[in-house]
Amino acid sequence: MREAFDEARAALATGDVPIGAVVLAPDGTTVGRGRNVREADHDPTGHAEVVALREAARARGEWRLDGHTLVVTLEPCTMCAGAAVLSRVERVVFAAFDPKAGAVGSLWDVVRDRRLNHRPEVVSGVLADESTTLLEEFFRAQR
């Protein structure tokens, strides 16, 4: 999670919302890193999770990320939760819940939807206070 927070803080330099993600291989090594780049790249899909999953898939040479773990500083949105399901990650670990847009238990629960063909394990609340503080400071400065 600390690596994901490093990515989140790096997003601040481009004015992006400070959300970071990493993808861990089954042996625990980092194979993908991502931070929000929506503002930097003018890309509506430039969410930290998508960026990290793309990098991990390129590193693996395959889109299936069986046995991998997606670690992110904020509960994934619908798009990112869907990307986690479609990439077949084994687990999703996140810090803070996102009551406004979260899709891993808050507003929706995409990753546990029985109608889908893959359901990753979910671990939530890892360093949640640190994530909440970082996001609150960012949005306070925006107002």
Image: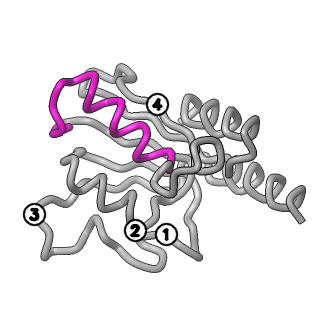
Residue at x 72% of width, y 39% of height? 14
Q: Residue 117 carries which label?
A: 3
Q: Distance between the residues labelled 1 and 4?
A: 21 Å
Local crowd at mark 4 within 10 Å, few (<14), some, or many (≥20)? many
Residue at x 25% of width, y 32% of height? 57
Q: How far apart are marks 2 and 3 (CA)?
A: 16 Å
Residue 50 painted magenta: yes
Q: Mark 1 points at which residue?
A: 102
Q: Which amino acid does label 2 sit on?
A: Thr
Q: Residue 78 carries which label?
A: 2
The reply to whether callout 1 and callout 3 are in contact (CB within 8 Å) is: no
Q: Position of residue 83 (x, y in %)?
A: 30, 54
Q: What residue type is labelled 1?
A: Gly
Count of all numbered marks drawn on residues in the image: 4
Residue at x 68% of width, y 48% of height? 16
Q: Name the residue under label 4.
A: 33
Q: Which secondary structure class fits the magenta region best?
A: helix
Magenta-drawn segment: 47-66
